[in-house]
């Protein structure tokens, strides 16, 4: 089965360089979340900059993950001092593994606090798509898939947990999640 790419994007209420307690708290929990997710079954890897300090996203060397990019609607800063975004690009073996990592442990705790740190943009915060074996998705791929999801909704090209598609393009799901989930999920035992 080909790997599954996941791109996330959120606009922070304040720049990453802001020394305020909420920004520090977000950054501190973020490091622990990355460590925990990195040990999760089904996790294959994520884009990590070579070197790079807090907020140094646009100038960083991302290697095979390509040049850093953001959605066209992001209107905050682009410098180390003004960047106010949090984003990830990762690879997974399957949808269930990604779901379990996102909705358990420290990441779940962080999700419960997301509105302390993130603005409500009215746009999708994440997108999935399948990539060919041996292909590393790029930041631009993630941006283009997220914008496609916003403009056209879930499709095999760009989808969510709730409206997922398998590698062959057929609707699929995770038992108990979304309308295309396993049909037995709603049946009585």
Image (cartoon, rainbow, N blue to C red):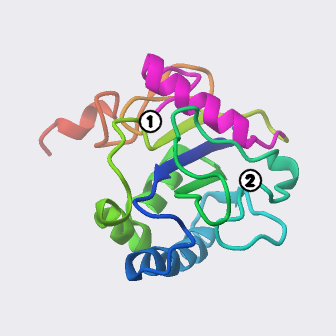
Q: Residues within 10 Å of mark 2 (few under 14, many from 20)?
A: some
Where, by quadrant of the figure, is residue 52 drawn? bottom right
x and y, in percent, of residue 62 in the image: 82, 55
Q: Height in image: 186 above or below 39?
A: above
> On the image, which quarter does residue 169 sit in?
top right
**What residue occupies the far left of the structure in this picture?**
188
Where does the image place residue 176, in percent across and percent down from the top left?
Answer: 28, 43
Q: Which mark is residue 73?
A: none
Q: Is residue 8 visible?
A: yes
- SS category of the residue bearing label 1: loop
Q: Residue at x 73, y 57 (%)?
A: 47
Q: Residue 28 location in percent, x, y?
A: 51, 81
Q: Which mark is residue 58?
A: 2
Q: Image height check: is 110 above or below 73?
A: below
Is residue 140 found inside the magenta-colored segment of the image? Answer: yes
- Quarter placement of the N terminus: top right
Query: Considering only vertical position in the picture, is 142 above or below 34?
Result: above
How far apart marks 2 and 1 lie (CA) works out to 26 Å
Residue stretch in magenta: 135-160
Q: How many marks?
A: 2
Residue 2 in view:
no
Q: Is residue 53 magenta?
A: no
Nearer the observer, 89 or 57: 57
> Which dot, 2 or 1, sits closer to the camera?
2
On screen, residue 88 versus residue 44, left or right, reads left
Considering depth in this image, is 60 or 146 the residue closer to the camera?
A: 60
Q: Earlier in the sequence, mark 2 or mark 1?
A: 2
Q: Residue at x 53, y 55 (%)?
A: 85
Is 65 located above or below residue 49 in the figure? above
Quick one: SS at disc 2? loop
For label 1, the residue is 160
Pointers 2 and 1 in contact (C-beta within 8 Å): no
């Amino acid at each position: 089965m080909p790997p599954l790419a996941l791109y996330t994007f959120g606009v922070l209420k304040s720049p990453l360089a802001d020394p305020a307690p909420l920004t520090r708290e977000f950054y501190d929990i973020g490091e622990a979340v990355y460590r925990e997710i990195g040990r999760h079954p089904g996790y294959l890897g994520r884009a990590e900059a070579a070197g790079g300090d807090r907020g140094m996203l646009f100038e960083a060397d991302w290697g095979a993950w390509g040049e850093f990019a953001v959605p066209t609607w992001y209107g905050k800063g682009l410098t180390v001092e003004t960047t106010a975004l949090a984003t990830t690009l990762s690879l997974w073996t399957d949808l269930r593994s990604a779901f379990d990592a996102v909705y358990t442990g420290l990441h779940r705790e962080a999700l419960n606090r997301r509105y302390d740190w993130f603005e409500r943009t009215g746009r999708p915060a994440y997108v999935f798509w399948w990539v060919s074996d041996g292909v590393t998705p790029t930041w631009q791929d993630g941006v283009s898939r997220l914008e496609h999801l916003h403009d056209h909704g879930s499709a095999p090209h760009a989808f969510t947990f709730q409206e997922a598609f398998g590698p062959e393009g057929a609707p699929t799901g995770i038992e108990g999640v979304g309308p295309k989930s396993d049909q037995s999920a709603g049946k009585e035992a």
